[in-house]
Image (tube, rainbow, N blue to C red):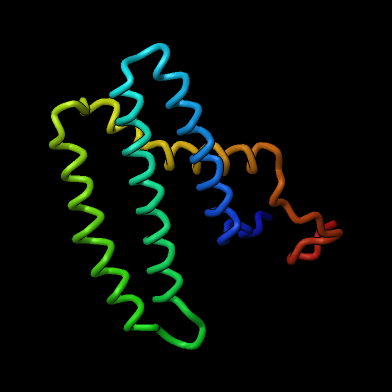
Amino acid sequence: MMTTTFGLDFIQRTLRTTGVLLLLCLVIGSVYFSFYDALAVLSAGIWSMVNLIFLSAVVRSAMRPDGVDKMTVVVLMLIKFPLLYAAAYFLFTVEIFRPLPLVIGLSTVLVVMFLKAASRALLKLDVNNHEGSSRGLA
């Protein structure tokens, strides 16, 4: 039986790991690839991290036990959608950034999340060890 321990700490750990990975990609990518490709991966990865921060803030404001905080949700949506997606449009229209490094940077957060979840499942870190299950079997 798996427990759901993927809370805010999972998101924070994912953001921290993604930040470290993006910095490593910048250093190593600058040596083996062009600097602008490495900078494109970093820029798109930071955009993806900021998007995740805003998305988690919107979800936390919308799904509260004491009701939806409508004002916070509206303010976050007004910041997230126009400004964040205008920044993404800028990233994709800058001529020095190629599309492939941008796509790699955008997907970095998702890859880190997948690998963290898969490693927790493979290592069985979220398994409850009960003496009996809900069916009464030992």
Instruction: Residue at the far bottom: name it.
Output: 66
- Assign the N terminus to one quadrant of the image: bottom right
Q: Is residue 49 left or right of residue 3?
A: left
Residue at 34% in and 31% down: 41
Residue 31 % position (x, y): 42, 13
- Give the x, y percent position of residue 136: 80, 65
Is residue 55 shown above or below 13?
A: below
At 65% from the left and 37% from the top, the residue drawn is 122
Residue placed most toward the observer, 40 or 99:
40
Of the pair 37 and 129, the residue shown nearer to us? 37
Q: Position of residue 120 (x, y in %)?
A: 64, 43
Image: 62 above or below 53: below
Horizontal arrangement in the rendering, residue 131 relative to residue 74 (left or right): right
Q: Quadrant of residue 129?
A: bottom right
> Is 99 or 63 nearer to us in this picture?
99
Say how many tags the image has: 0
The quadrant of the picture occupied by the C terminus is bottom right
Task: Name above or below for residue 117 compared with residue 81.
Answer: above
Asked which quadrant contains residue 110, the reply is top left
**Which residue is pictured at 36% across the width and 78% down the height?**
72
